[in-house]
Image (tube, rainbow, N blue to C red):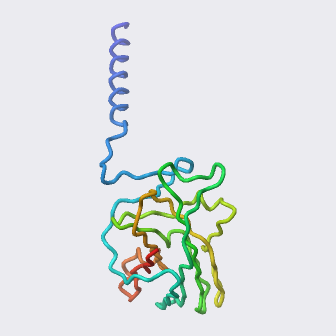
Amino acid sequence: MYKTLKKIGAIASITLLTLALGCSPSEQNPETIESRDRTSGETTESPATKPISAPTHSVGEVISISQNNLNLQFTVNSTRVHPGKGVIQPNKGNQWVVVDTTIVNQGQQPQTFSVVSFELINGNNNTYQVALLASALEDIETPTGEISPGDQRQGQLVFEVPEDTTNLKLLFQPNPIECEEQSTAAKGLDCQPIVVKL
């Protein structure tokens, strides 16, 4: 009886050890390491993507977007670096880039935009998502949400990037969900993002 219990205990120990080793974190490929926000845990940088072939616009330029059910004007008004405030800070070695934008709905239907419509890309084609933590800052007001026909929304998008990042461009995708579905792309929907050099 004692020997049987001892064998069962040994088998259980080996099984647990195997499971623990199998679940241990694997080494990350240096090319796909993501930087994460220390407070929120959100991913701020994605691996390099293919170069964007869309035309590049400038800060202050009013960009007209007319496709399918969209009739918009989009403008990047200005950019600045935000130092953070109190406990709301970018990670060490990073900075928050604030992009002030205006979206005008000139169409006949309400249009809704979310943070997934926007990202930054640098000279190495690394992409950066909107830093959601920074939206808690008092002087940041998001331009996302529903815009009624004839209305406009001005606000700031904040991205966390390394301090030495250069050649930043804002990518605005008015139809991110629709463009994920290949069937709508076949109906003539333009899925190239609007690109603005910052």
Q: Which of 61 and 146 lies nearest the eye of the viewer?
A: 61
**How many numbered marks are there?**
0
Compared to 160, does 150 lie above or below?
below
Residue at the (33%, 8%) spot, across then down: 3
Q: Where is residue 114 in the image (x, y as percent from the top left)?
A: 56, 71
Q: Position of residue 11 (x, y in %)?
A: 33, 21
Q: Which of 59 and 22 lies nearest the eye of the viewer?
A: 59
Compared to 74, does 44 lie above or below?
above
Compared to 133, does 183 lie above or below?
below
Looking at the image, which residue sits at the far top?
2
Compared to 101, does 96 lie above or below?
above
Residue at the (61%, 56%) spot, across then down: 84
Residue at the (42%, 79%) spot, across then down: 193
Residue at the (59%, 57%) spot, across then down: 83
Q: Which of 163 and 36 lies nearest the eye of the viewer?
A: 163
Q: Which of 160 and 40 lies nearest the eye of the viewer?
A: 160
Q: Position of residue 45 (x, y in %)?
A: 42, 58
- Res. 16 image quadrant: top left
- Res. 21 image quadrant: top left
The N terminus, quarter of image:
top left
Left or right of residue 183: residue 159: right
Q: Position of residue 19 (x, y in %)?
A: 36, 32
